[in-house]
C-alpha cells in the first residue's frame, strides 16, 4: 500500500476550515476543505501530512496552525461552533456588523454543570441558553424535547423558537483566526540574539524593568520587557523564565523568547495593544458598566489563576494593572516578574518591593506566599473590577496596612455590588489562609452568579425554573 499513511483505528482525520499560505519553509500551505493526518500536536502548530480523497499521503509533512483545522465529523467542523469562548466574547462577536436577529453560535460553556452554551442575538441584546445532557447523553434545552446529536438540536431551533419570538437564523460571522510564527520556535531555541529585535515606543515602566512595543525580524509585532542585569544574574534569570515556557493557557500572556546575553535582558511576549485592565476600567462610564461583563473578566482571571494553581505556581503581584486586554476582551494575566514555582506549599520572600494594598497579611508580616496569598490579591482585584478601578484602601497609608488588617478591617462593598459578589471578596480576605477558597472554587462561585435564559416550557415543566435559574438575586 505504498503512498498510504500508516493509521490505526484510533487515527483521526482533520479538515481545514480556511485557506492558509505558508510564510516559512517548515509550514504547509493548504485550501479550505483539505484533509490531514496529524502526526504530532505541539503547541499552536501541529505536524501533519496532507491526504487525498482516498486517504493517500500527498507531499511532504509540514506544520499547520492548529486553529485552522478541525476533527472531521465533529462539532468543531460546524460553522456555528466557536469552541472555547467567553460570554463577553460571544456578545461582542454577535453584536458586530454582519449579524442580525437570530444569529447564533455554540461555545464551550464557562460553567461546570453543563458543557455547551447557545448564544443568540435578539435585536439589541444577546441571550444565552444552557445546552444540557441527560443520562442517555441526549442534548436538550428544556427537558421537553431531546436530540441524539448537537447539530440536530440546532436544526430543530431553526424551525421553532428558542424563546418567545426568537428563532435561530444564520451562524455568527466567523473570521479567519490569527496565526503567530513565533510558536514554531523549538523549546530549545527560546534564547534568541538581540539583533533579531527592534525596540519601538515604550508602553510602560516599573522599578526594575521597562516594556516596549517591538518587532521581531522586521515583521512580527511583539512586546519586549527589558530587565537590567543589576536586578538579577543570568543564572537566576534563566531559571525563573524557564518554567514560564511550559505554561500555556488562553488567559496567560504567552512567552515567545528570551535574550539573556548582554545588558539589559529581554523577555519577549505577545503584544496586546489595548493595554491593561486598570486603565480599561477607569475609562468606562457608569452607564457602560455591565455586571455580566465584569463577571466574565473575573472568571477569566480566576481560570488563568486556577491553571497556575494546578501547576504549583504563585504570581505574588495579581492586580488589575497586571491584566492585559486583547481586542476581543480576552484577559491575559501578565507581569510574572514576581512569580515563583513552589515545590513546597510555602514560598518565603523578605523583599521590600511589595504591592502592600494587594498583599495578604501573612505575606506582609512574614514574607510567606502561597496560592492562598494570591487568592487574597484576587479579592482586591475583584474589588477593583466592581469599583471601576478604585484604589484599594484609599484612606489608609501604606505603612499602616498590616495593623489595620490585623484589627479585622476590610474594604466596604463597591457601589452597586451585589451581596453575593461582596461575600466572595470577604472569603478571599479571610485572616486564616486555609479558610480562603481555591481558585477552582472561586471560578465556580463566579459562574453561579452569571445569568442564562430558559427556553419556553410547558406548565408541567415550569417547576424546573427554580432548579435551572442561576441568575443573580
Image (cartoon, grey):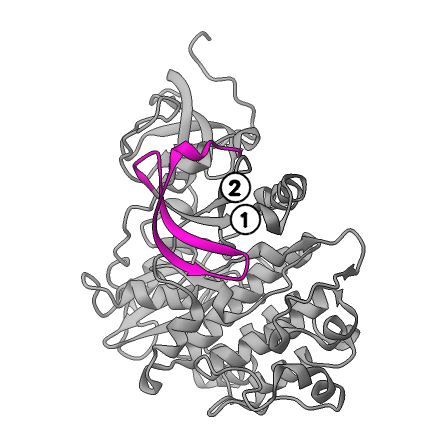
Q: Is residue 303 magenta?
A: no
Percent of width and height locating residue 251: 50, 57
- CB atoms at circles 2 and 1 under 8 Å apart? yes
Residue 168 image-quadrant placement: bottom left
Left or right of 136: which side holds 14?
left
- Toward the top, the furthest residue is 2
Q: Would you name the residue on which mark 2 appears?
A: 263
Front residue of this view, candidates 41 and 181: 181
Q: Which residues are magenta?
A: 191-220
Mark 2: secondary structure: loop
Where residue 27 sits in the image (x, y, percent)?
Answer: 37, 26
Q: Which residue is mark 1?
A: 228
**Height in image: 346 above or below 216?**
below
Q: Is most of the magenta stretch helix, strand or loop? A: strand
Pick whichever, 324 or 41, lies toward us: 324
Q: Position of residue 353 (x, y in %)?
A: 64, 66
Task: Classify mark 1: helix, strand or loop.
Answer: loop
In the picture, measured across the screen, residue 128 lies left or right of residue 243, that is: left
Q: Residue at x 54, y 61 (%)?
A: 207
Query: Can you say whether 218 is above or below 147 in the image?
Result: above
* Mark 1 residue crowding within 10 angstroms, few (<14) / some (14–19) / many (20+): some
The picture places residue 188, in percent across and down from the top left corner, at 57, 29
Quarter assignment of residue 92: bottom left
Q: Nearer the viewer, residue 34 or 237?
A: 237
Q: Residue furthest front?
A: 230
Tally the numbered discs.
2
Image point (53%, 51%), residue name: 249
Check the image and name the residue furthest to the left: 98
Question: Is 308 positioned to the left or the right of 286 in the image?
Answer: right
Examine the rendered structure and indicate whether residue 14 appears above or below residue 125. above
Amino acid at each position: 500500500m505504498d503512498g498510504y499513511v500508516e493509521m490505526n483505528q484510533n487515527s483521526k482525520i482533520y479538515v481545514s476550515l480556511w485557506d492558509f499560505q505558508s510564510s516559512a519553509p517548515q509550514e504547509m500551505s493548504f485550501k479550505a476543505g483539505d484533509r490531514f493526518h496529524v502526526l504530532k500536536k505541539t503547541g499552536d502548530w501541529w505536524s501533519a501530512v496532507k491526504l487525498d480523497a482516498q486517504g493517500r499521503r500527498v507531499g511532504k509533512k509540514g506544520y499547520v496552525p492548529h486553529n485552522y483545522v478541525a476533527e472531521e465529523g465533529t462539532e468543531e467542523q460546524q460553522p456555528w461552533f466557536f469552541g472555547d469562548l467567553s460570554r463577553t466574547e460571544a456578545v461582542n462577536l454577535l453584536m458586530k456588523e454582519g449579524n442580525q436577529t437570530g444569529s447564533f453560535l455554540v461555545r464551550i460553556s464557562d460553567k461546570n454543570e453543563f458543557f455547551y452554551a447557545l448564544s443568540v442575538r435578539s435585536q439589541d441584546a444577546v441571550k444565552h441558553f444552557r445546552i444540557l445532557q441527560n443520562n442517555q447523553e441526549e442534548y436538550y434545552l428544556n427537558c421537553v424535547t431531546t436530540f441524539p446529536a448537537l447539530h440536530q438540536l440546532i436544526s430543530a431551533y431553526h424551525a421553532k423558537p428558542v424563546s418567545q419570538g426568537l428563532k435561530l437564523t444564520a451562524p455568527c460571522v466567523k473570521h479567519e483566526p490569527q496565526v503567530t510564527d513565533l510558536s514554531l520556535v523549538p523549546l530549545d531555541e527560546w534564547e534568541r540574539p538581540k539583533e533579531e529585535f527592534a525596540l519601538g515606543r515604550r508602553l510602560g515602566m516599573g522599578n526594575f524593568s521597562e516594556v516596549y512595543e517591538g518587532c521581531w525580524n522586521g515583521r512580527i509585532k511583539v512586546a519586549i520587557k527589558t530587565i537590567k542585569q543589576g536586578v538579577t544574574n543570568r543564572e537566576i534569570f534563566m531559571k525563573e523564565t524557564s518554567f514560564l515556557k511550559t505554561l500555556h493557557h488562553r488567559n496567560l500572556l504567552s512567552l515567545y523568547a528570551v535574550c539573556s546575553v548582554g545588558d539589559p535582558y529581554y523577555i519577549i511576549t505577545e503584544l496586546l495593544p489595548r493595554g491593561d485592565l486598570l486603565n480599561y476600567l477607569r475609562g468606562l462610564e457608569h452607564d457602560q458598566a455591565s455586571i455580566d461583563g465584569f463577571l466574565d473578566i473575573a472568571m477569566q482571571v480566576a481560570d488563568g489563576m486556577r491553571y497556575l494553581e494546578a501547576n504549583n505556581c504563585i504570581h505574588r503581584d495579581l492586580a488589575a494593572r497586571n491584566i492585559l486586554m486583547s481586542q476581543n476582551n480576552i484577559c491575559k494575566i501578565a507581569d510574572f516578574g514576581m512569580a515563583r514555582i513552589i515545590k513546597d506549599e510555602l514560598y518565603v520572600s523578605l523583599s521590600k518591593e511589595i504591592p502592600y494594598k494587594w498583599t495578604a497579611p501573612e505575606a506582609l508580616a512574614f514574607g510567606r506566599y502561597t496560592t492562598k496569598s494570591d487568592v487574597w490579591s484576587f479579592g482586591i482585584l475583584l474589588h477593583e473590577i466592581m469599583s471601576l478601578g478604585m484604589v484599594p484602601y484609599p484612606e489608609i497609608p501604606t505603612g499602616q496596612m498590616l495593623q489595620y488588617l490585623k484589627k479585622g478591617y476590610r474594604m466596604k462593598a463597591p457601589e452597586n455590588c451585589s451581596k453575593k459578589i461582596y461575600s466572595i471578596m470577604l472569603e478571599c480576605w479571610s485572616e486564616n489562609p486555609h479558610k480562603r477558597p481555591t481558585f477552582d472554587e472561586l471560578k465556580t462561585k463566579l459562574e453561579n452568579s452569571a445569568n442564562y435564559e430558559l427556553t419556553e416550557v410547558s406548565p408541567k415543566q415550569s417547576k424546573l425554573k427554580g432548579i435551572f435559574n442561576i441568575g443573580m438575586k
